[in-house]
Image (cartoon, rainbow, N blue to C red):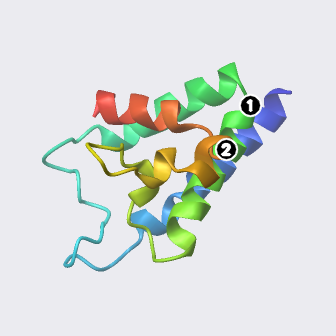
Amino acid sequence: MSQLTSFLLVLSLCAFAPLCFSSMTKGGHLYPQFYDHSCPKAQEIVRSVLAKAVAKRSPYAASILRLHFHDCFVQGCDASLLLDSSGTIVSEKRANPNRNSARGFEVLDEIKICT
């Protein structure tokens, strides 16, 4: 079981690798040094929260990988799937097609709180 958890953790971290290797620095794209000054421990926080979540419940790795895929597949990685609803706007996160399908938001919300 430990090997499966490790494999899933590595798989989920690899899913986020394209964000880290983006060479574009304009137009809202991320680059490897994006958080160096505003949140120098961002990568450490992401890694530790993901590891803790996957150790607690291994399906989180697949769920977070799926969230990443669905966010990036249609119009690029814009994090639109991670936005909360506000006022009269229903975000993708809580939209009917994702309501009982997309999982793992609580792990990403914990990462956002920590950073």
Query: Label 1 belongs to which residue?
Result: 58
Q: Which of marks 2 and 1 is nearer the N terminus?
A: 1
Between 53 and 77, the one nearer to me in the picture: 77
Where residue 15 appears, as percent x and y from the top left, is 59, 59
Image-based side of 9 in relation to 108, left or right: right
Where residue 110 appears, as percent x and y from the top left, is 41, 28
Q: Residues within 10 Å of mark 2 (few under 14, many from 20)?
A: some
Task: Check disc 2 and give the amino acid type.
Answer: Ser
Task: Check disc 1 and give the amino acid type.
Answer: Ser
Between 92 and 68, the one nearer to me in the picture: 92
In the displayed structure, would residue 72 be above or below residue 16? Answer: below
- Residue 42, quarter of the rendered image: top left
- Going 36% across and 49% down the picture, which residue do you hit? 83
Number of numbered callouts drawn = 2
Query: Label 2 belongs to which residue?
Result: 63
Between 2 and 66, the one nearer to me in the picture: 66
Q: Residues within 10 Å of mark 1 (few under 14, many from 20)?
A: many
- Residue 113, quarter of the rendered image: top left
- Element marked by disc 2: helix
Between 24 and 79, the one nearer to me in the picture: 79
Image-based side of 61 in relation to 67, left or right: right
Measure the C-alpha gap from mark 2 to mark 1: 9 Å
- Element marked by disc 1: loop
In the displayed structure, would residue 74 be above or below residue 13? Answer: below
- Going 23% across and 71% down the picture, which residue do you hit? 28
In the displayed structure, would residue 13 be above or below residue 2? Answer: below
- Going 59% across and 62% down the picture, which residue do you hit? 70
